[in-house]
Each structure stands twice: as C-alpha cells, then as structure tokens.
Image (cartoon, rainbow, N blue to C red):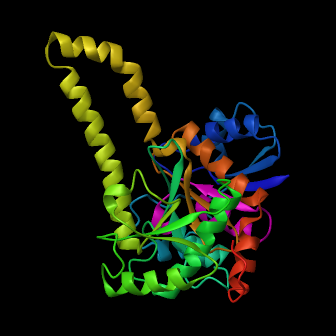
Amino acid sequence: MIKLAIDAMGGDYAPKEQVEGAMLAIKNIPDIELTLYGEPAKIEPYLTDSTRISVVPSEGVINMGEKDPIRAIRSNRKSSMAMALSSVRNKENEGVVSSGATQALIAGAHILVGRMKSMKRTAIAPLIPNIKGTSTILLDAGGNLEIKPEYMVQQAYFASIYAKEILAIEKPLVGLINIGSEEGKGRVLDQEVFKLFKENPNLHFYGNVEPKEVLNPPCNILISDGFTANIVMKTIEGTAKGVGAILKEELKKGVLGKLGLLFSIRNLKRFKKRLAPEEIGGAMIYGLNGVVIKAQGSSKAVGFYNGIRQAANVVRQDVIKKVHSVIESDNTDEKP
C-alpha cells in the first residue's frame, strides 16, 4: 500500500474539500492509505467513509497569507501541515498533499522532509494544459527567483524522469523559455543554460522556446528561473480567465449572440475545464527526500483528489530514487 499524508486543514475550503477529495481518492485508487492531519471535530462531519482513511489530531493551521513561513513552520510543529510533512521524514508516509500556503509548504518541506543531497535547489513544477489536450511541465514556478545554470540542469533531469515515468513520454524534450528562438538570445543566465543543455548527453534539448508558444509548445518541458516561469504561469491563468469572460460577454450581446450562447454553453464549459488547474492536480516540489504535492489553494474535492492521484503515481513509479541515480551518474552517456 502507498501511504500518503493529507494536510486536511490547509486551503481556502478546508477541511470539507480535502476530506471529500480524500474519499474520492480511496474510491478510485485501490492501493493507497491516507492519513488526514487536522482537527477531528471539523473533519468528521465530512468523513462519511473512513475506508483506508485515518485521522491524526493536529493543533492550529498555518495561514494562507503567512508572511514569515520559516518562523511559522518552526513555531507550529503541531499544525496540520507540519505534522503531515514530519510524517514523511519519519517514514510513516511516503508523500504529502496540501492546499496550504505555498511558501510555508516549501519552507516546511525543506526543514521537515529535507532536500535530496544530490539536488542543489528544489523547484515547483506544475503541469500546464496545451492545445494538444495533454500537459506540459513548467518549472521553476516560483521556488528560486535566482539560480545558477548548473542547478537548472539538475531540475531538467528531474523533469525528464517525471515526464517519462508519470506522463509516459519516452524521450521528453526540454525547452528553455526565452525571448527568441535563436541561439544566443536572452540574458547571460539563458545563454549559459542553453550551452549546458545543448552539450549534456543526459537531456533531449529542443532549444529556446518563445512565450507565445507556451500553450502549443514544441517540447514536453518548459524551464526557466523561478521569476520568469512564475510570470508565465500566472499569465496563462489570467489570460484563460480573461478570454473566457470576453467570449461569454460577447455572446450575450444581441439576440443572435444570446442564441449562440445557448448553443455554445457546453463548448464553453469544456473550454473552461481544459484550462482548469484542478483537472491536473497540483505542482510537485522537485528535489526533496519525499513526495510533496502542492494542490491549488482554492481546490475543490476533484482537484484535491487529482493531487492525491498525482502523488500516488510518483511514489508508485519510484521517481525520486530514479532521479537520484541519474544525478549521481551524471557523467554517463545514458539518457533518462
């Protein structure tokens, strides 16, 4: 059985959506056991099926707007998030899923789970939709605003193995987000990363990818520093919402528009669903000694369930061990 820890109190709609998401996961994933960390009195009204689900009492919640995440984790070791993370360090669970505050989860993961010795920097790597109907790995979506080129190579290794083992892509292509597609474009960082990627036998490097290609990329992995990739991710989210709102508003104008809206309502719902982060699950934090998935703070039950499904898949495929092996044998010619 795959044992996962659930931060039942983290998120905008906790614990209702987290508990209902956990029950969905138990119903649909037969090889998992879940431990919910939180306040039993608040959890139990929603826990109508406790099959392979246990509850461990916690004290307190780390707020979504926490300004000092390191202090919050260190001073709230009995909070639901801290206890869930500690359970992975103690080998009680193999992974954590949380909708809690992003920076607190990153800080807590570093302190309580620990970084892989072979990884110099962690990274947040969400899956973003593309027009092919599949997903693209985007990293680093905010973990490191500044980073060294050689650390990005390690992150690309992790993403490549994730793509192969979880997304079933035999030879995942890595693209470097840049202001132009030609070699030599961008900042000094981009130029140095391009050179390292191009010369690395352990990566399948496509080259530079312009932001206008993000939703129709020529590759499976898009990588940049945390500042740039985070802007890309938030631009996609904002654009999707804006385009959807514009379409709906235009279709409401005039009799023909309203008639068109009536006939298009199903298509609009499908459009919204394809771009919804909840359909994918969450963002994995790369480079830790355990599996940590950051689900959307506004996750509803289905979105949280997808985060649990994602965590179970990563554990099942032993991704972390495979990443460690590749990084340790960085000088070999074998490709991930």
Residue drawn at (57%, 85%), measured in percent from left and top?
Answer: 120
Tell which of 171 and 281 is nearer to you.
171
Tell me where residue 57 sits by quadrant: bottom right
Residue 79 in view: no
Q: Residue furthest front?
A: 182
Rendered location of residue 51, percent (x, y): 81, 37
Question: Closer to the camera, 2 or 82?
Answer: 2
Q: Is residue 213 visible?
A: yes
Q: Is residue 278 left or right of residue 311?
A: left
Q: Is residue 100 magenta?
A: yes
Left or right position of 224 against 93: left
Q: Is residue 215 above or below residue 91?
A: above
> In this rendering, would 31 be left or right of 230?
right
Residue at (63% x, 60% y) in the render: 163
Q: Quadrant of residue 110?
A: bottom right
**Can you say whether 267 is above or below 202 in the image?**
above
Q: Furthest residue to the right?
A: 1
* Count of numbered tags: 0
Q: Which residues are magenta?
A: 79-104
Front residue of 241/115: it is 241
Is residue 298 within the magenta segment?
no
- What residue do we see at 26% from left, 34% from top? 245
Q: Position of residue 196 (x, y in %)?
A: 50, 85
Q: What residue sits 49% from the left and 76% below the top? A: 70
